[in-house]
Image: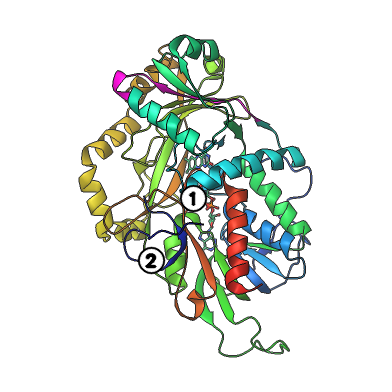
Amino acid sequence: MAAAALRGRGPRPFFSFSSSSSSCWRRPRGLPPGPSRPLSGGGRPGRSTFDVAVIGAGILGLASARELSLRHPSLVFGVLEKEKELAFHQSGHNSGVIHSGIYYTPGSLKAKLCVEGSLLCYKYCDQKGIPYKQCGKLIVAVEREEIPRLKALYERGLQNNVRGLKLITSKEIQEKEPYCRGLIALDSPYTGIVNYRQVALAYAEDFQTAGGTILTDFEVEDMQMAKESPPGSEEGLKYPVVVRNSKGEEVRCRHLVACAGLYSDRLSQISGCSPEPRIVPFRGDYLVLKPEKCYLVRGNIYPVPDPRFPFLGIHFTPRMDGSVWLGPNAVLAFKREGYRVYDFSLQDFMEATAYSGLWKLVLRNFLYGVGEMYRACFLSAQLKQLQKFIPEVTINDILRGPAGVRAQALDNDGNLIDDFVFDEGTGDIGGRILHVRNAPSPAATSSLAIAKMIANEVERRFEL
Ligand SMILES: Cc1cc2nc3c(=O)[nH]c(=O)nc-3n(C[C@H](O)[C@H](O)[C@H](O)COP(=O)(O)OP(=O)(O)OC[C@H]3O[C@@H](n4cnc5c(N)ncnc54)[C@H](O)[C@@H]3O)c2cc1C
């Protein structure tokens, strides 16, 4: 695995690429997609020592915990999650697209893990009976100047070994998507859709079946090296890291994996490691097509992306429930887990504005940012973008929909970090923890491949 230097300062990456009482939760078999619910006796209630504790029950924390518990049945694993539900943040607020791996720089972690992860994702869904649709995707050029960029994307997709890619003509676009207009398009037939919350809950179920414990309502606030063994314990300092939550409760463990999404920089700081790269929250608002207009869209329809940003642009995405979502945009959010336009957190705001990297980013992209905010406020402005692809969509056909917030890492120079970043730290606790630092899209698609890589790294570093 190629290791390259992380842009900006920070901990040494092990693989990166530049560009009350807590409750035990389990998803019983047959629970429909959606939030999991508590069980009185699920998992191993009361357990408070773990060989490895994973922080964060999003799709990556759960996939990693699952992989580790399947590989090491004799060890004890726990997942610590601050919410009362699993997959509550990014993993439960996304487009639900199983990406095929077109966009990413050849040789990058995103390219490798997305291609591998999408195959694993389809296989896993087949094994578990999780519904998905391989409805395909068109990346459509609507302006002449987009054509060279689209062709470059095609070449990139081929280099990344994406299956089935081809460039299609305007006539072929209409055969596939009768209401879509475009000059040429890149056709990716193996792109699909799935409900990632449902996938994450299935990982949680596998993990608990393998003996793992999930503690929800457990917000990790502090980590210390134990100075003495717990009272009455015969195990001495076998579990030397004491992890405390915001209620003062503690668990002990030997090693940790932090998959904290929008809080990954704060978790890094709590563990004594570098806060950089910082996380910048980018809210993405969706619009939804009224049910009677969903016939306008068959598969995923995407624009040719703006090369300056890691986001893919406003797209038309069919959902597993038959609805069609339009979006998401990308607006700087004033609260990390703020899903509404006016959500504001003083702490998040102060931290963000004190970071010089954010100012460099804002100044460099000021007009673009203002444009995104304008489009977020005025539906008619967003509609104009959508009509470039499907002219039939009118203001009467769309409603405001849900939102998600992306955890996007930003370096000190104001660069949005393109690739996935994982790192370790220094110091007593730093030597016992691995951090997922940047795992935006397509990390849900790549979750099983990322989990394998994390498990390999945990085994290697911590000599499990
Ligand atoms: C709008 C949007 C659209 C997207 N579309 C796609 C897509 O179509 N396809 C795709 O592959 N990817 C997509 N993604 C990306 C994908 O959703 C994420 O990459 C993925 O969900 C990241 O998973 P995670 O487990 O790292 O983070 P999360 O799901 O955010 O999980 C992190 C967890 O850590 C917990 N946590 C944080 N701090 C603490 C603490 N102190 N103590 C305990 N727990 C803590 C949080 O509560 C949370 O549950 C999209 C993302 C967004 C936002």
Q: Identify the residue at horizontal 72%, vertical 90% (top origin).
A: 232
Q: Where is residue 214 in the image (x, y as percent from the top left)?
A: 67, 61
Q: Is mark 1 on a helix, strand or loop?
A: helix
Local packing at callout 2 (Cα closer than 10 Å; few below 14, some 14-19, many 20+) is: some
The residue closer to the viewer here, 252 or 413, is: 413
Comes first in the chain, label 1 or label 2:
1
Which numbered disc covers residue 133?
none
Q: What element carries label 2?
A: loop
Local packing at callout 1 (Cα closer than 10 Å; few below 14, some 14-19, many 20+) is: many
140 drawn magenta? yes
Classify residue 383 as left or right of residue 75. Answer: left
Q: Identify the residue at horizontal 64%, vertical 68% (top origin).
A: 21
Q: Distance between the residues labelled 1 and 2?
A: 22 Å
Q: What stretch is highlighted in magenta?
A: 133-146
Write down the residue under mark 1.
109
Residue 35 visible in the shown view:
no
The residue closer to the viewer here, 279 or 335, is: 279
Residue 33 is drawn in which quadrant? top right
Q: Position of residue 63 (x, y in %)?
A: 63, 53
Classify residue 218 as left or right of residue 409. Answer: right
Write down the residue under mark 2.
275
Residue 277 vertical position relative to residue 74 in the rendered view, above or below = above
> Which amino acid type is shown beneath numbered disc 2?
Pro
Count of residue discs: 2
333 drawn magenta? no
Residue 223 vertical position relative to residue 415 in the rendered view, above or below = below
Residue 357 visible in the shown view:
yes
Residue 129 vertical position relative to residue 335 in the rendered view, above or below = above
> Which amino acid type is shown beneath numbered disc 1?
Leu
